[in-house]
Every structure is written in C-alpha cells, then in structure tokens.
Image (cartoon, rainbow, N blue to C red):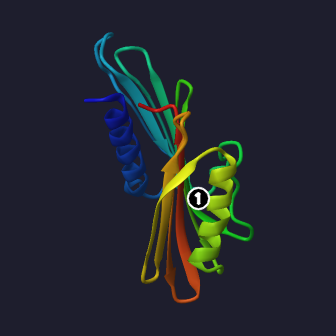
Amino acid sequence: MTAFTRLAAFAAAAVALAGCSGEGSPVTKESAEPEDAPRGSYAIDSETGETRARHTDTDGTTTTLRSGEKVPVALPAGFSLYPGAKVTNNTRVEQADGLLVLLNFESAAMPEDIARFYRTQAEAAGIEVGTSLQSGPMTMIGGESGAGTSFSFTATRKGEVTQAQLSVGRGLE
C-alpha cells in the first residue's frame, strides 16, 4: 500500500468517524498496539463536530487531520476562500512537508464564476489547469504544477446555491 493510499484511507476513516459520535463528551480513541506497530488517535468534539486524528506509521511518519465546519481555513499560498462563501466543511491533512486541504463551501455565485476565480489562482500558483469540464449544472477544473502541487475544483448549482469543493495538495505520495 502506497503512502498516498494509506493517507487517503486514514483521512476517509477519520472523516467518517465524525458522524459516529452522539451527545455528550468528545470521543477519544488511542490504539494499544505493540511498540513497532502504527499508532493513532482520534477525537470528535460533540459540540462542534470537529474531528481530529493523528497516525504514526511504522516508519515514524506522522499524519494529522482536522475536519469540520469550524476548522480555520488556511489554504496553501496563492489560494483563498471565494469571497462571500460559507464553509460547510474543511479538512486539513498534514504529513511531514505534505499538505492536503479539502474545502467544501456554498455560494450564491454561479459555478463558472467561482471556477474562473480558482483557475486564476491556480495559474498564478504555477499550476497548469489541464482538466476542464462543464456538464449541465456541474463545472470542474483541475491540474498540477511541475513542483507537485495538485488542484481540483468542482461546483454544482442547486437552485439558488452553488455547492463547491476545492482540493489543493502538495508533497504527499
């Protein structure tokens, strides 16, 4: 299993756990594995729904995750939240020098306008936008830089609201 596959599985599992807690105290779990086994923990804040997770692989690589609507937005240099957008979820995964931000948000703006905003930011960050798709109410763009930064943006119009997802990552294998 590649490091990226492990990271993706870790992120998906931690985000899925966010929906598993009920009322009351935060849920916290720590593994009780042998010394040479991977170690991890997660906590779910029952008031905010924020999930925090940490995993250390057998090679000593530590991956951390924060996910939730109230997680502060800290996008990689050159990227910003679309003006006036409302964040519905923010997931941030860090591993060594690597970073993945997956930002879900809503806006009254049209998908094409938001896509144009992020295309401009991506190109200014040295990312070549190689994928562009418009299909009905959905707009998608994506690409990567020679330095290994990947980027994707997807937006779908539902009634008077555009639901969008921005993903920016670098340094993850």
Q: Is residue 126 left or right of residue 3?
A: right
Q: Nearer the viewer, residue 152 or 106?
A: 152
Q: Is residue 50 visible?
A: no
Q: In this view, does 9 lie to the left or right of 72?
A: left
SS category of the residue bearing label 1: loop
Seen at 37% across and 21% down, the residue is 57
Which of the 4 quarters of the picture holds residue 66? top right
Which of the 4 quarters of the picture holds residue 120? bottom right
Q: Nearer the viewer, residue 165 or 43?
A: 165
**Local crowd size for mark 1, using a 10 Å CA cut-off: few (<14), some (14–19), many (≥20):** some
Q: Nearer the viewer, residue 52 or 115?
A: 115
Seen at 41% across and 43% down, the residue is 11
Residue 105: horizontal and vertical position, in percent? 58, 66
- The amino acid on which the numbered mark 1 sits, given as a three-letter code, is Glu
Residue 116 to residue 146: above or below: below
- In the rendered image, which quarter contains the N terminus? top left
Residue 152: horizontal and vertical position, in percent? 50, 55
- In the rendered image, which quarter contains the C terminus? top left
Q: Is residue 18 visible?
A: yes
Residue 54 to residue 35: above or below: below
The residue singled out by tag 1 in the image is 69
Residue 6: horizontal and vertical position, in percent? 33, 33
Residue 112: horizontal and vertical position, in percent? 59, 75
Residue farthest along the top direction in this orientation: 35
Seen at 28% across and 13% down, the residue is 34
